[in-house]
Amino acid sequence: MVSISRRLRPRVGAALALLALAGTACAGEPPQGATAPADPGIGHVHGLGVDPADGTVYVAGHYGLFQIRSTDTARRVADRIQDHMGFTVVGPKTFLASGHPGASDVASGASPHLGLIRTTDAGITWTPVSEAGVADFHAIQPAGAALYAYDSQTGRLRRSGDDGRSWTPGAEAEVVDLAAHAERPDRVYATTPDGLRVSEDGGVTFTALAGSPLMSHVDSSGEDELTGAGADGQVYTSKDGGTTWQASGRLPGPASAFTAVNRQHVLAALEDGTVVESTDGGRRFSVIYRPARS
């Protein structure tokens, strides 16, 4: 087995964009006599999840965390604007996230990197867990006692055995998405520009999964069960750990976020912010949220 070589240097575009915004008026605090800025909406969707406490679907976007209320209504949680580059649901009302604070926080002196943050009240409040001001985790994946995350700032996969308080560095990689399952916590999958790869040693080394379709996103709903989405929106499933794949349904377009809640329940966000849902394992999808068109 060999480590994945990194092809791209850590991206700082999101941080630079926030620093640029820091020089403008803070959202909700316009200069005297000025008109309050319009709500920026969700922005690009980076993560999706379902709260097992009540079944609410959450959308983690460039401008905040939102609850889907209807096909045309998504409610911002706690009126907070912050960029969730990584997001996952780990229990009832309990989520992990990473990314960047809002422009008003940056203007007040906050670091452009949140590190790993945690909420136990469904996003009303967040507390720092680790790597504040340092890490920007673009993928966060629990696997039982293990937690995996890809840090865009170092270009490395990391693993934690204490809920994200401390980390062990893994392979250098250009990771788009991660998949793992509690029944095999040492096995982690990564989608990369060169194809799907798998590690059997907790992310230290990876090998290519020969014959796997090129996918942008992948998730695991069982020990050997995988569901993924190709760049063209084609959905694929595997029941043998990625050895063989079957084409399932097709998304209306490329996915910007993708998650398998369980074997049958699959969620995806499209590039335009539309959120679709499948209740038959990815064979058919229906729209559960569509953003307003300007």
Image: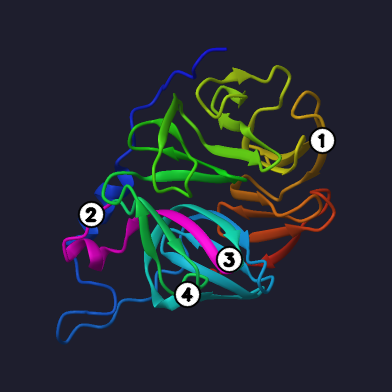
| 170 over 160 or under it: above or below | above
Amino acid type, mark 1? Ala
Please provide percent x and percent y for residue 290: 62, 67
The mark that comes first in sequence, 2 or 4, is: 4
The mark that comes first in sequence, 1 or 2, is: 2
The mark that comes first in sequence, 1 or 4, is: 4
Could you give the CA–CA distance between mark 3 and mark 4, rounded to whole angstroms?
Answer: 9 Å
Amino acid type, mark 2? Ser
Amino acid type, mark 3? Tyr
The part of the image, by quadrant, that contains residue 209 is: top right
Other residues around mark 4 within 10 Å, as few (<14) / some (14–19) / many (≥20): some
Given residues 193 and 237, the one toward you in this image is 237
Could you give the CA–CA distance between mark 3 and mark 2, rounded to whole angstroms?
Answer: 25 Å
Magenta stretch bounds: 93-112
CB-based contact (under 8 Å), mark 3 and mark 4: yes
Q: Is residue 98 located in the magenta-colored stretch of the structure?
A: yes
Could you give the CA–CA distance between mark 1 and mark 4, rounded to whole angstroms?
Answer: 36 Å
Q: Is residue 279 located in the magenta-colored stretch of the structure?
A: no
Q: What label does residue 58 carry, if any?
A: 3
Please provide percent x and percent y for residue 243: 77, 23
Given residues 275 and 188, the one toward you in this image is 188
Mark 4 lies on a secondary structure that is helix
Please provide percent x and percent y for residue 270: 60, 53
Residue found farthest to the top: 1
Mark 1 lies on a secondary structure that is strand
Could you give the CA–CA distance between mark 3 and mark 1, rounded to whole angstroms?
Answer: 27 Å
Q: What label does residue 111 carry, if any?
A: 2
Q: What label does residue 247 carry, if any?
A: 1
Given residues 212 and 21, the one toward you in this image is 212
The mark that comes first in sequence, 3 or 1, is: 3
- Give the residue drawn at x 69%, y 59%: 276
